[in-house]
Image (spheres, grey):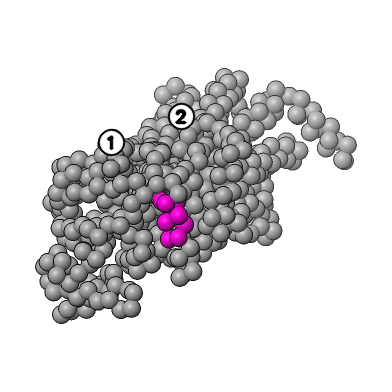
Amino acid sequence: MSQPVLAINRASLGFGQRSLWQNLDLSVKPGEFVAVLGPNGSGKTSLLKTLLGLNQLDEGSILIHGQPPRRGNNQIGYVPQQKSFDKDLPIRGRDLIHFGLDGHHFGFASHNKSDLQRVGKVIDEVEATQYVDRPIGLMSGGEQQRLRIAQALLGKPSLLLCDEPLLSLDLKYQQMVSALIDDYRKQYGMAVMFVTHDINPILNMVDQVLYLVAGKWAIGKPEEVLTTERLSQLYGAPVDVLRVHDRIVVVSSNNADELNGHHV
Amino acid sequence: MDIMFNMDLSFYISQPFAQHALLAAIIVAVICGIVGPFVIMRGMAFAVHGTSELAFTGAAAGLLVGNNPLAGALCGTVIFASIIGLLGVKERERDSVIGVILAFGLGMGVLLLSFYHGFASEATNILFGNIFGVSNGQLVVLTLIGIGAVVAMLVMYRPLLFASVDPEVAEARGVRLRLIGFLFIIILALAVTEAAQIVGTLLVLSLAITPAAAAQRLSARPVIVTLLSITFALIASVGGLIASLALGNVKASVLITSISFGIYVIARLVGR
């Protein structure tokens, strides 16, 4: 058994009176792919922010390579939720990727040859060579998103945290980006925490599903968690998990609106 | 006529008062040129305006207390910037805080000025600048502050850029957003105070924003934008000053703002 990249132990997080999740336990090994699912407001993004050292737990502990979360951890790659850039921002795609190298350092930039080779490689990998030198504000949401993924992969992190990374990508690039992330975890043993509304594009890569609903959670293999019984129990309301061809769809049994904005 | 004109100009340029002015114009242009792109990226145009209004209040107080408007303006802007930096983190919140303090501060400035019974020109110099009134002592102060501000900007250039473009990821990567934002607004206050000596508190934006706004139309490379912004600020301030010497009866700040505006219009026409 290799040492876990991430060990969450009886962790609880809340803001003021509101509790997001309680007594959460999760262990992630190198190369493991964890899909984080759940309705809006269930604390998926807050979980990632806690791992980044930006939120403090109310109770319990989190260890990343045996250390508590801290900002600026070079072992973590982070792809935030899609937010588009201002149109006239004086930044090229390449500059955004360079931030991944040393954007947090004071003083002058000094990129050696191997740094620039790494940059060239990740640009290739997300197929951004064509547009990487254009102003970032003039790119489509999907083009920007691919650069964010390139930036996060640049440092070969041992833990990749992505928040809805496929949201603005079309089908072709959804597949390309998921395959790239899959490739990195196999090649470099990178563990992945992947927040998503739709598990289907990554279903064949997922080792564990963490499903958060209103303070409660379930964890396990996809086929264990994504069942009618388990999710009905979690939601406290009847939910149907349907398999249509090789896709999984979650629907509320009595009211389609209840799971609004959430299709697994 | 032409020869007369040139002789006049070369005569003026050789005089200490004009050389002081020239040096001050260069220092101010460089610091404003560097700060400007970040002012735009961080949506801080209103902070520049607010800071310059408080430079007016501070200068009026300085004039009244010790006949030293520059020291007063420096105190006013740095105190104001510290308050903004400590209170308003979010952009929207920041703007309302600025509005509140600006209005009160400006009222205080008018009150202070009404107690002042010295030369009336001192008061208008605060508002519209007096580039030719730069004394030896002031020049030393302007130079030291200018160098300090430029060095600080160069040292924090990358994390500031990262924090301005992509605060979420920057914070996750270890950039201390609050610290960087606070340092920047202090440097901004110093730049505004310097610019206010040259173009006056009312026209600071013409050096702190216009050159950067023009530069952004022409390039999307951060370093190029910064260099262009400095260049445009230099053309405006030095050009305005020399034009004012040559024309004789037009205030330098008027010419500086006009050149600055002209560069912006051209950049909009030819740029992206």
What is the chain identity of the residue bearing mark 1? Answer: A
What is the chain identity of the residue bearing mark 2? Answer: B
Question: Can you identify the residue that label 2 sits on?
Answer: B74
Quarter of the image for residue A256 reads bottom left
Drawn side of residue B75 relative to residue A120, left or right: left
Question: Can you identify the residue that label 1 sits on?
Answer: A66
- The stretch of residues the image draws in magenta is A178-186
Inspect this view and state whether residue B60 appears. no
State the residue in front, B206 or B12. Answer: B206
State the residue in front, B103 or B113. Answer: B103
In the image, what residue occupies the spot 22% across and 74% down?
Answer: A241
Q: Amino acid at mark 1?
A: Gly
State the quadrant of the C terminus of chain A.
bottom left
State the residue in front, A168 or B191. Answer: A168
Q: Position of residue A101 (x, y in %)?
A: 50, 41
Tell me the distance, in whole angstroms, between the alpha carbons under discs 1 and 2: 49 Å
Q: Amino acid at mark 2?
A: Leu
